[in-house]
Image: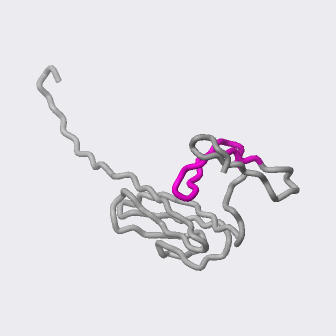
């Protein structure tokens, strides 16, 4: 300051822990970025492994904790066999179809009807 006084402080910058993953049929592969290893894993059903295999349909939540006690969660849904995996949102979404990108609006039919229409268009608005 103007009197020549100084103050020193030490800060620890902690890298943000981020958890993501992918569902492939009845398997979940988890990806962890940031934070500080080693990590611990806890699933809502009590499992403590990073990845899961052979799971029945349902919702699965993983909580990942790093060595600094930072935590992050991710939720995964395994759908019943034959389910397309589309969610019933009424917003414009991008879908990766084959080697291209398609966009489409999804709108469910009446609640009693489990089927719904999700027309898709390729990047130049051609129906797929």
**Image location (x, y in percent) of residue 60:** 60, 67
Say if the magenta span includes residue 97.
Answer: yes
Compare residues 110 and 46 and report the one nearer the observer.
110
Residue extending farthest left: 4
Q: Is residue 65 left or right of residue 56?
A: left
Give the percent coordinates (x, y) of residue 105. Answer: 69, 44
Which contiguous range is marked in magenta?
89-107
Q: Position of residue 86 (x, y in %)?
A: 68, 56
Q: What residue is drawn where x is 18% and y is 39%?
A: 8
Question: Main SS of the magenta segment?
Answer: strand
Q: Residue furthest bottom?
A: 54
Instruction: Name the residue nearer the viewer: 8 or 71.
Output: 71
In this image, 81 relative to 111: left or right?
A: left
**Above or below, comparing residue 123 to residue 52 in the picture:** above
Colour treatment of the image: one colour
Q: Position of residue 28 (x, y in %)?
A: 54, 70
Q: Is residue 121 magenta?
A: no
On the image, which quarter does residue 124 sit in?
top right
> What residue is shown at x 17% (from left), y 24% (from top)?
1
- Relative placement, left or right, of 30 versus 118 is left
């Amino acid at each position: 300051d103007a009197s020549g006084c100084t103050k020193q402080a030490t800060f620890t910058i902690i890298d943000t822990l981020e958890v993501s993953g992918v569902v492939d049929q009845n398997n979940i592969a988890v990806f962890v970025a940031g934070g500080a290893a080693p990590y611990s894993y806890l699933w809502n059903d009590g499992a403590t492994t990073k990845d899961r295999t052979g799971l029945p349909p349902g919702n699965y939540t993983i909580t990942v904790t790093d060595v600094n006690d930072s935590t992050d969660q991710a939720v995964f849904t395994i759908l019943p066999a034959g389910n397309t995996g589309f969610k019933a949102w009424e917003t414009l979404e991008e879908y990766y179809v084959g080697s291209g990108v398609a966009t489409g609006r999804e709108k469910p039919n009446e609640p009693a009807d489990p089927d719904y229409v999700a027309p898709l268009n390729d990047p130049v608005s051609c129906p797929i």
